[in-house]
Image (cartoon, rainbow, N blue to C red):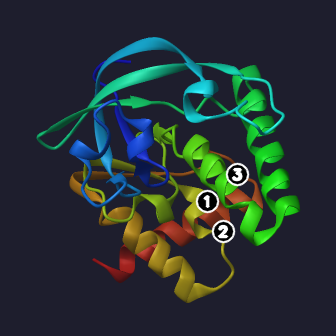
């Protein structure tokens, strides 16, 4: 939706953007992973894979992928990105099927004869940008990002390794520039809820 903040789940390549290489930060790459973007507009798009060479001598029928184009801002840069269809959608299944067949054909063709098929495979794969909401992130994916307020779920304490737990909590809490909310389990007398509350208390006491 317009105004929503998204984050790149993987590097966004030039084929996913209408502006192509002219907007790239590096050759062929528009944006690195974990970059924050602000959505300005969203429009439906029917992406014909024939435009990327699918169906030209590979035995595959040209496929049209129903997806969206998002106009986004990354800092001072404005881009129009073709979005990767959601997991489980019919469009995603179609796209994954085409990629799987191209990959298999390239492998079967061998190193020399498969070069053209591999180029087509990577062109189709890179023609869609993998973005996700920045509002809900794993601690690992939040690294490098800063938010005004951060809500940290209690499952950050799940790892049994104490050093890893401390690293996770530190990264999670240090993402905030204004406030941190520590979200525990609902009030309960269960052993797990009590243990979770105790872990929060110990962590806060160590930093008091």
Expressed as whole percent of the image width and height from the top left, the position of residue 191 reads 75, 62
Distance (Cα) linking label 3 and label 1: 44 Å
Contact flag, marks 1 and 2 (Cβ < 8 Å): yes
Distance (Cα) linking label 1 and label 2: 5 Å
Task: Looking at the picture, tell me which residue is in the foreground, 84 or 110.
Answer: 110
Q: Residue 149, can we see it?
A: yes
Helix, strand or loop under label 1? helix
Which mark is on residue 155?
Answer: 1
Expressed as whole percent of the image width and height from the top left, the position of residue 120 reads 63, 46
Residue furthest to the right: 108
Pointer 3: what residue? 117
Distance (Cα) linking label 2 and label 3: 44 Å
Q: Residue at x 76, y 62 (%)?
A: 113
Depth check, mark 2 against mark 3: the one in front is 3
Contact flag, marks 2 and 3 (Cβ < 8 Å): no
Helix, strand or loop under label 2? loop
Q: Residue 202, can we see it?
A: no
Task: Looking at the picture, tell me which residue is in the foreground, 132 or 135.
Answer: 132
Which mark is on residue 103?
Answer: none
Q: Residue at x 34, y 27 (%)?
A: 4
Q: Residue at x 31, y 60 (%)?
A: 27
Instruction: Tell me which numbered mark, 2 or 3, is placed earlier along the sequence.
Output: 3
Q: Quadrant of the N terminus?
A: top left
Task: Looking at the picture, tell me which residue is in the foreground, 137 or 180.
Answer: 137
Horizontal relation, residue 86 to residue 168: left or right: right
Depth check, mark 3 against mark 1: the one in front is 3
Which mark is on residue 158?
Answer: 2
Horizontal relation, residue 33 to residue 186: left or right: left
Expressed as whole percent of the image width and height from the top left, the position of residue 78 reads 20, 33
Q: Residue at x 60, y 41 (%)?
A: 124
Helix, strand or loop under label 3? helix
Residue furthest to the left: 76
């Amino acid at each position: 939706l317009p105004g929503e903040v998204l984050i790149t789940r993987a590097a966004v390549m030039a084929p996913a953007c209408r502006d192509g290489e002219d907007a790239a930060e590096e050759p062929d790459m528009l944006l690195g992973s974990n970059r924050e973007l602000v959505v300005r507009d969203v429009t439906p798009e029917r992406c014909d894979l024939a435009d990327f060479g699918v169906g030209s001598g590979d035995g595959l029928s040209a496929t049209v992928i129903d997806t969206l184009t998002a106009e986004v801002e990354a800092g001072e840069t404005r881009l129009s990105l073709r979005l990767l269809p959601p997991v489980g959608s019919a469009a995603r299944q179609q796209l994954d099927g085409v990629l799987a067949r191209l990959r298999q054909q390239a492998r079967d063709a061998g190193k020399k004869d498969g070069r053209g098929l591999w180029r087509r495979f990577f062109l189709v794969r890179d023609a869609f940008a993998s973005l996700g909401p920045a509002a809900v992130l794993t601690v690992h994916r939040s690294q490098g990002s800063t938010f005004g307020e951060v809500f940290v779920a209690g499952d950050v304490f799940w790892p049994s390794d104490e050093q890893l737990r401390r690293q996770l909590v530190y990264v999670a809490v240090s993402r905030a520039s204004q406030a941190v909310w520590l979200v525990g389990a609902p009030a309960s007398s269960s052993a797990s809820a009590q243990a979770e509350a105790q872990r929060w208390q110990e962590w806060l006491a160590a930093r008091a």
